[in-house]
Image: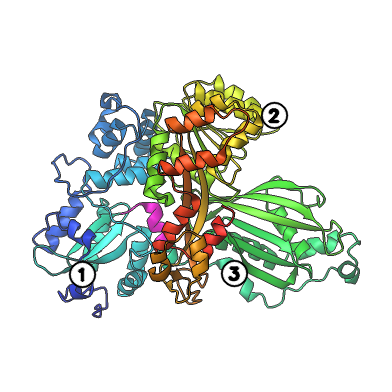
Amino acid sequence: MPAVEPAGELSEDPQLRLDRPASGREERATNRPWPKDEGAAAKAQDGAAAEEEEADVAVAEVAEIEPIPGGEQDIELLDRRARKDRVISALFKEGSISIEQVEKGLTKYGQEGGREAIWRVLASIPGVDRDRIFAKAAKVYAFPRVEIDDQHPDHEFVMLIMETIAEERREDLLRLNLLPYEYAIDPETGGARLMFVTHDPARSEIHRLLAQLKVGRFELRYAPESELLRVVTQIFPKRNEYLDRMSAEEDHAFDFGTDFQEDESTLVDETALEAEMSRSVLLNLFEASLIEAVRQGASDIHVYPNARRHIEIHFRVDGRLRKWHADEKVAAEAFLAVVKDNSTNVDRFEREAAQDGFIQRRIDEVLIRFRVSVLPIASANQELRAESVVIRVLDDRKVLTDLSKLGMLESAMEKVQHAISQPHGMVILTGPTGSGKSTTLVAALYQVISPEVNVLTIEDPVEYIINGVRQIKLGQKLGLEQAIRAVLRHDPDIVMVGEMRDKATADLAIKLANTGHLTFSTLHTNDAPSAVSRLYKMGVEPFLLAYAINLIVAQRLIRKLCPTCKKPQKQRDKVMMERLGFNSDDIDNLELMGPAKDPSCPTCHGAGYKGRRAISETLYFSQEIRHMVAESGEDIDEEAILKQAVKEGMLTLQDCAREIVKQGETTIEEMMRVTASE
């Protein structure tokens, strides 16, 4: 690639297009008329930010956003100022925002002196879907959307361009989530122009900044803020100040005394423990672990003593535990005491009972919640002198509101979409703990949320706040069965029951589905047909199951190969491939991909895998399936149901995993690990 000129000047050398030919995305981007000169370019795009401009905009291929299901709302209900805001009026008309949310936005707009557009102020109101608002603004002002994935934008390209920009200007770009995306071809001159991507392309500050950088001809595109933040974090990781402080501590060994170290039956010396807790290194290690867990995308933090009673900290990333830190100079008792002392509702002095607590931190300008579980465990000598702590990371940025982001195959996605579009019936998610059931349920709920329906969920615990949903938290005074009975009297349209645990809760959930409510729930079974057997064995009558259930989805999460460092595998186990259902042509000719596990890889850091996607067995209840279940009699024939479902086009979990292997996204070994019991 030709060198990029320094000192903030970006080359417009037409030869750049030879190194970065226009892709399909680039060609589509050229549909938008291009201004005659650089000044006109800035003015033309800057004008898109003017909220009062009523001129029609010729929309090319712009950021698409699906309206929330439900009827249109009367635009005349809005305040005059809100009606004049084209973004607000479009969102309100399609039912994406409520009158109450608009009123809150107008109040804040007035308090701030009207410096920002009303729709931009509304995006800062708690409980409002920011990505939806910015996506609608991009569509209104004709800014096309680009895809953000593992290959786009290219990390090396972003770094190369950013290095040519002065540091303070670089910070401005990152503050605005404004990244160079790729070179495109100017349809008028045939020369190269630089494409930038941001979540708010209508912001005039962005156009002024790019004009000051003298980037020449440029084009702006839209991408969701949450996706851009992920890319920024990957390319420009922030320093962990607590790790820096730890490295400055030369000696943090501690001593509880000879008696404590050698005799596990001796009580903990609380005075020595208190003294050690006051040392900054323990607090730095604790805070550093929270920050690194969030930045590395961990779902859980595991903290426990090793055989030598020193602390070990592990992160669960992509479903697998990885050791993050082990310190021979830090005794477990001291560090665990610091964790407990910094957790709400946890008693530091209680060491023989299970405890649940809560932590909250603002990390990288985002509020992150942590759920803490403390358990007493046996030490090497089988005495309850040790404890284990698991901290669940609750990062709202990980909540998926789009089913397509789950990675389901198209055939499975079509069945799910059809099932949740029904006015009543039950959708059941099955699978072991950690298979992504809750994530899929929440994504499905977001497809049916509307101001015109009453959506209730029953959860234990409530981990993520779902906009537009009334979430019921179970506790000592409100059990699952009691909560479901109460929901029946609460005029629901759509209900999510966390888990059907026994006959009573299953009966009530089935009753909801059979009385005109769309119902979502989960079960712990290995596959879709066995969910029918499980409910039957709980005591639910077959004829009730037959006509209540719309769909059963058995799900697993399979790790994806790192897109940066994956490489072709030369060796293959043909016998194993045959057992896993690959045909003879695939066994001989399919190019299998494998993990490079390159420690220098900036994407996976040597893990070989990055991210996960869902594989799903979707059992849709056709008329034939309903008839088979209703006529089951004394026993549910799972094998017969499976054969009929496959005949009707259902892919099993193994079928789905095999397709992903063929696509080069995962390995035979990962397929075996996830589907071995199927």
The residue indicated by pointer 3 is 243
Q: Horizontally, is 349 left or right of 635 in the view?
A: right
Q: Are marks 1 and 3 in contact (CB under 8 Å)?
A: no
Q: Secondary structure at mark 1?
A: loop
Q: Nearer the viewer, residue 196 or 508?
A: 508
Q: Secondary structure at mark 3?
A: helix
**Amino acid type, residue under disc 1 in the picture:** Pro
The residue indicated by pointer 2 is 477
Q: Main secondary structure of the magenta part?
A: helix
Report the Cα–Cα distance between label 1 and label 2: 64 Å
- Against 88, is 214 above or below? below
- Against 529, is 632 above or below? above
The residue indicated by pointer 1 is 21
**Amino acid type, residue under disc 3 in the picture:** Leu
The residues colored magenta run 223-231
Q: Horizontally, is 576 left or right of 183 in the view?
A: right
Report the Cα–Cα distance between label 2 and label 3: 43 Å
Q: Horizontally, is 490 left or right of 483 in the view?
A: left
Residue 262: image quadrant is bottom right
Residue 501 appears in the picture as rendered: yes
User: Closer to us: mark 1 or mark 2?
Assistant: 1
**Amino acid type, residue under disc 2 in the picture:** Lys
Using a 10 Å C-alpha cutoff, classify the residue at mark 3 as few (fewer than 14 neighbours), some (14 to 19) or many (20 or more): some
Q: Nearer the viewer, residue 88 or 520?
A: 520
